Structures are given as C-alpha cells and as structure tokens.
Amino acid sequence: MKPTLIAATLALATLAAPLQAHPHVFIDTSVTVVFDDAGRVAGVRLVWLYDDFFSLLLTEDMGLDPDGDMALTEAELQELSDFVLDWPEGFAGDLTLEQGGVALPLGPRQAAQVRLVDGRMEESHYRPLQTPVSASDAPLIVAPYDPYYYTAHIVDEVIGLEGGAGCAARLHPADIAAAQTQAEQILFGRSIDQFGPEENLPEVGHLFADRVEVTCVP
C-alpha cells in the first residue's frame, strides 16, 4: 500500500496488543496473468477492491461525497482518481513476481483506473514484466502484498489467464497462524502501530502473502 494511503488510516488506528501484526485496510485482489503470442508470461492485471470502511474514510477525508451516498460526481471521481493513482517514487505496487526464487523486474503501471463499486473503491491496473518469461521452464510465483502489512490483500481463488494455452494457475493461501508466529518473533513484543516515526517499520507482509503459482506444459 502506498505511503499516502497508509497515512490516511493511521489517525483511526488504535494501538494493538503487543506481539501482533494486523492490517488496517483490506483489499479483495483479483489476479489475471497475461501471456504474449509466444506463450510467455507478459504481465499481470490486478483489480484491488478496498473494504467499505476505508473507502468511506478516504472519501470523507478528501471532502468528497458530502451526502454520504457513495455516488460520486464525475469531478469528484476524477479528484479521487488523481489522488489514488498518484503513486510516489519507489512504490513497488504491492506486487512481486518470482521465478526460481529470483524477483523479476516489472515495468511501469499501465491502464490504471479508479471507480466506485457498490460503495467500495476499486483500483485496477496492469503491470508488465520488463522481459516476458516462460512458465514452462520453472513455475512463476505472483504475490500481491504490502511489505508492511498495513494492507491485507485477499486474493480471489479464481485466477484469470489471458492466453497461455497449456498453462494453469493455482492459489496458495497464506497460513495466517504460522505467519503471525513468525511476525511476533520479528516484532519483539511490539505491534506495528507501536513503532515510532523515526524507526524503520519491519517488513512482515511477505509472511501473510497469498501466492499464485503459474505453470505451463513445455
């Protein structure tokens, strides 16, 4: 989750019990793996559907939707889009692609859009790989997660495949109980909320990440 959106949640975040990592924002995340004409993985299309509370919080904080009906005017939606889509430099987009344990470089976000769906904010975009890869050489792992776990990405078990004849995708949900145990060891008795502004937040998000495994028949 990008820092500007993290900041919008901190004012409402209450101190958690020690030895606890917990998110403040929940995103239902849809993953579609896109293949090129040669059958290689070319990129990933993502749809982030934010939870009701955060969607309401953000629109209220920005002074949008004063009547509270979660139906924005065209001008209000444009203002929301400009804010949400203004990713800061260095933000990785809550997405990691790996093959053989090696992270694959991603290109800039494309086709980014924001809309409201039944009162919930939805952000969609496409992330191309800098260099397409074959998932028949080794499985490709797609992991959408916030490194700091302020945001929890809950990946839809239905994984989209565009192209890629002979390819399949399987979701490996995170073991939350095991992740919490490991996170407690990293946090040393403090919740993420209890770290001061000058401290480096621990990166425990990977422990809670749902992972999509993509394989192709050679």
Image: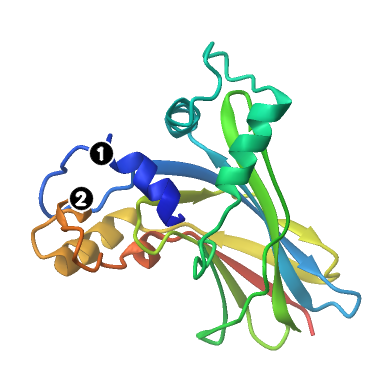
For the C terminus, the quadrant is bottom right
For this orientation, the residue located farthest to the top is 67
Q: Quadrant of residue 160?
A: bottom right
Q: Position of residue 40 (x, y in %)?
A: 80, 79
In the image, taking residue 37 as reference, residue 102 lies left or right, namely: left
Are there few (<14), some (14-19), or many (20+) residues within 10 Å of tag 2? some
2 and 1 marks in contact (CB < 8 Å): yes
Crowdedness of circle 1 by 10 Å Cα count: few (<14), some, many (20+)? few
Amino acid identity at mark 1 = Ala
Q: Which residue is mark 1?
A: 13
The answer to whether 119 appears left or right of 63 in the picture is right
Q: Is residue 92 visible?
A: yes
User: Which residue is nearer to you in this view: 147 or 59?
Assistant: 59
Residue type indicated by callout 2? Asp
Can you name the residue that lies furthest to the right here? 37
Colouring style: rainbow
- In percent of width and height, residue 30 lies at 63, 49
Q: Is residue 134 above or below residue 212?
A: below
Q: Is residue 26 above or below residue 106?
A: above
Q: Secondary structure at mark 2?
A: helix
Q: Which residue position holds label 2?
A: 193
Residue 70, x across and y down, in percent: 58, 20
59 horizontally vs 170: left or right: left
Lower sequence index among marks 2 and 1: 1
Which sits in the foreground, 74 or 125?
Answer: 74
Measure how far apart labels 2 and 1 are at the Cα level.
8 Å
Query: In the rendering, at what x and y percent does residue 106 appear?
Result: 64, 75
Q: SS of the residue at dot 1?
A: loop
